Amino acid sequence: MATMTVQGHVPAAVTPFNRSGDLMLDAFAEILTWHMDCDCGGFLILGDNGESWAVSQEELKQITQTAMKTAAGRVPVFIGTSAVTTAETVARSVAAAEAGADGICVQPQSYVLNGTKSEIVSRFEAVAKAAPLPMMIYNTPLRTGMNIDHDTLEAILGVAPVVAIKESNDDMKHASRTLLQFRDRIAVFIGNGENILPAILLGSAGFISTGPDLFGKETNRLLEAESMSVTERLQWQERLIAVFNTVLGTGTRPSGYKAALNMLGLPAGYPREPVEPLTPDDEAKVRRVLVECGILGRQAADRAAS
């Protein structure tokens, strides 16, 4: 069974493309370096923010190689390898392994919507046999149309070298049960920004979410929720809700998040077809929230001073 320690705030990094849709690997490396300078605990590459659905297997190798070279052993790197079919997921997982990935991140089959326990578990087992790297499970009912219940999660742990789960079921009751039942065996990360603080107080290993990393070096303060006053927790919760919902809810994901990174002076580039960049009106909406939450001016100053 593979082992790996991963905790803290783990960015689900973007994949930068230029206006023509070409990969910008130097820009990708710059963004990863910024995240590490902000003391992230690892990376999830080619997840939703990484536009994994728009990247070829050959590009996956290039992206993985760039991520591994940039991380240089400072933090663990998980590569999202999921596709609709198990065969393609296996192929992408093998490609990530060949490119040197520390681990892979796999979700249930999307589009099918109502996969059985047997179908889901068999998928993870097949990937584990072909590419026996440390595995992160990604439970994302919004994306796949199905939830990994706790009996199914238990079964997956029996057939795959799972070290972590990104729990993006936004039902806090479900996340609480995941923590209660599995936190002593695998690292449980929270994906929904609104649930980060409650989950930290309940013992989560950290979070893999869109938006909190925009706070830069301040982001890791969230991991210290137990030491915060009630007032500070409530203030953080208000900011998290505003950033999470605005960045994800403006435009088509991940265009809002890429726009926010660009506003901070980071070369996130453009989304790849079929996703379009934000309109000027939507950019203004994102910018307003970043200013109101104290992100935009502070992060620009931090980058100028570094």
Image (cartoon, rainbow, N blue to C red):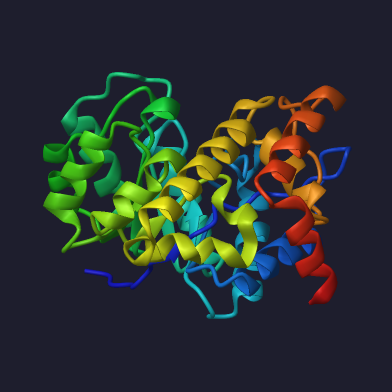
Residue 251 position in % (x across, y down): 69, 25
Residue 37 position in % (x across, y down): 65, 74
Q: Is residue 184 left or right of residue 191?
A: left
> Closer to the camera, 75 or 87?
75
Q: Residue at x 20, y 25 (%)?
A: 116
Write down the quadrant of residue 215 in the picture.
bottom right
| Picture layout, residue 278 above or below residue 34 | above
Tell me the quadrant of the picture where the N terminus can be found. Answer: bottom left
Q: How many marks?
A: 0
> Closer to the camera, 10 or 151?
10
| Picture layout, residue 69 above or below residue 109 | below
Q: Is residue 302 left or right of residue 86?
A: right
Write down the quadrant of residue 288 in the picture.
top right
> Closer to the camera, 237 or 65?
237
Q: Residue at x 55, y 38 (%)?
A: 244
Residue at far bottom of view: 73
Residue 24 position in % (x across, y down): 80, 54
Q: Is residue 5 left or right of residue 216?
A: left
Residue 157 position in % (x across, y down): 18, 53
Tell me the quadrant of the picture where the C terminus can be found. Answer: bottom right
Q: Is residue 97 visible?
A: no
Q: Is residue 53 left or right of residue 154?
A: right
Write down the quadrant of residue 167 in the picture.
top left
Q: Residue at x 80, y 48 (%)?
A: 262
> Closer to the camera, 88 or 49?
49
Q: Residue at x 17, y 31 (%)?
A: 117
